[in-house]
């Protein structure tokens, strides 16, 4: 499962895998200490307006004054929204004269103004800081589909294929005729699979649905990506009204199927069009080829 160990309101932990740091002797500045933003394409280094939930990348370079021998000791990031501060990172440094860090995160998932403050402190307790404001506008509207049902390979009542563009469920022959629209299929497999949502491009889809109408015969097999995720504790499914809550969960996902699904499981997806969304499993009924899954979808339009 894709773990998101952050308070959703601040979303900084999504950047942690991208943190890089280095320490080298020989750098010097006239300031004690010095801290600067990394500029250039793709980096935010000044006040900016973003859509709620949009990705953001920040680079920081900091240096000690080597003539004083006061090496860098601490780096801290505080994000403040609606006058409520949150310490997003508080890191002790290992006696270094130079420190660099790149962080990739997301704008606050609601409209308003958030201030990011970056503070570097040396071993003498002397600090320097930088900050900027992010003005967030409301996220884009979403489409919601409730209580959709997909059947497994031997289910004759429900279709097995789904199009997130319009929420239509297709039986296999119709899915073949509308292959460009199909984002995922459902099957109940054995072993480590069990209840599974699968991209048409995944080899398992062609193996499970091996008839003449199966994905192997489709002219297009969409390569949808999935990840099992957890909604942050302060976000409820029914409160998701725009894509600002969806983007952080569906960014960077890489799997072509999500298996071992259970009731109340949340699955993020990203379609080949770039559209992102979330699937909530409502229930799994039965096992094997005649089983079916009931789920709801919140997706970008």
Image (cartoon, grey):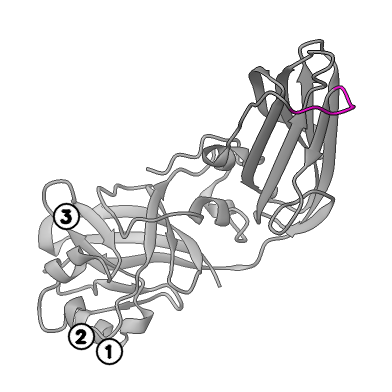
Q: Nearer the viewer, residue 182 or 65?
A: 65
Indicate whether residue 29 is drawn in magenta.
yes
Q: Are marks 2 and 1 in contact (CB under 8 Å)?
A: yes
Horizontally, is 1 left or right of 209 in the view? right
Q: Is residue 20 magenta?
A: no
Q: Main secondary structure of the magenta part?
A: loop
Quarter of the rendering containing residue 159: bottom left
Residue under the point 28% across and 63% down: 198
Residue at (31, 60) in percent of width and height? 256
The location of residue 121, given as percent across then percent down, is: 78, 20
Quarter holding residue 34: top right
Question: Which mark is first along the chain, 2 or 3?
Answer: 2
Q: Which residue is mark 2?
A: 173
- Quadrant in which residue 59 is drawn: top right
| Front-most of residues 81 and 145 | 81
Question: Which residue sits furthest top?
Answer: 124
Q: Is residue 81 visible?
A: no
* Residue 138 in the image, given as x and y percentages of width and height: 73, 60
Quadrant containing the N terminus is top left
Residue topped by disc 3: 286
Q: In the rendered structure, which disc, 3 or 1, sits on the residue that comes first in sequence? A: 1
| Numbered disc in front, either 3 or 2 | 2
Label 2 and label 1: CA atoms lie apart by: 7 Å
Q: Position of residue 221 (x, y in %)?
A: 29, 77
Q: Is residue 176 left or right of residue 264?
A: left
Q: Position of residue 13 (x, y in %)?
A: 57, 37
Q: Is residue 54 above or below residue 185?
A: above
Residue numbers of the magenta segment: 27-32
Label 1 sits on residue: 177
Pointer 2 local density, CA inside 10 Å: few below 14, some 14–19, many at least 20: some
């Amino acid at each position: 499962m894709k773990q998101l160990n952050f308070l959703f309101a601040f979303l900084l932990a999504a950047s942690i895998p991208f943190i890089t740091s280095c320490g080298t002797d020989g750098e010097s500045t006239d300031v004690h200490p010095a801290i600067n933003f990394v500029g250039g394409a793709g980096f935010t280094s000044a006040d900016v307006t973003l859509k709620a939930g949009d990705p953001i990348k920040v680079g920081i370079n900091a240096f000690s004054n080597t003539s004083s021998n006061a090496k860098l000791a601490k780096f801290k990031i505080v994000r403040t929204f609606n006058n409520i501060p949150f310490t997003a990172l508080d890191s002790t440094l290992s006696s270094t004269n130079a420190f660099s860090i790149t962080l990739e995160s997301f704008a606050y998932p609601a409209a308003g103004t958030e201030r990011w403050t970056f503070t570097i402190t040396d071993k003498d307790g002397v600090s320097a800081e930088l900050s900027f404001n992010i003005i967030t506008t409301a996220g884009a509207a979403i489409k919601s589909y409730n209580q959709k049902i997909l059947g497994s390979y031997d289910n004759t009542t429900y279709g097995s294929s789904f199009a997130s563009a319009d929420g239509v469920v297709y039986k296999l022959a119709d899915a073949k005729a509308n292959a460009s629209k199909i984002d995922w299929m459902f099957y109940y497999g054995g072993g480590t699979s069990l209840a599974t949502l699968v991209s048409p491009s995944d080899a398992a889809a062609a193996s499970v649905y091996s008839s003449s109408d199966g994905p192997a015969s489709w002219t297009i097999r969409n390569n949808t990506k999935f990840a099992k995720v957890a909604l942050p504790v302060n976000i409820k499914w029914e409160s998701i009204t725009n894509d600002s809550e969806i983007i952080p969960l569906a960014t960077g996902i890489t799997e072509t199927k999500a298996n071992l699904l259970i009731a109340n499981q949340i699955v993020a997806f990203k379609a080949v069009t770039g559209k992102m969304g979330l699937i909530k499993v409502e229930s799994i009924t039965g096992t094997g080829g005649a089983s079916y899954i009931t789920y709801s979808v919140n997706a970008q339009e």
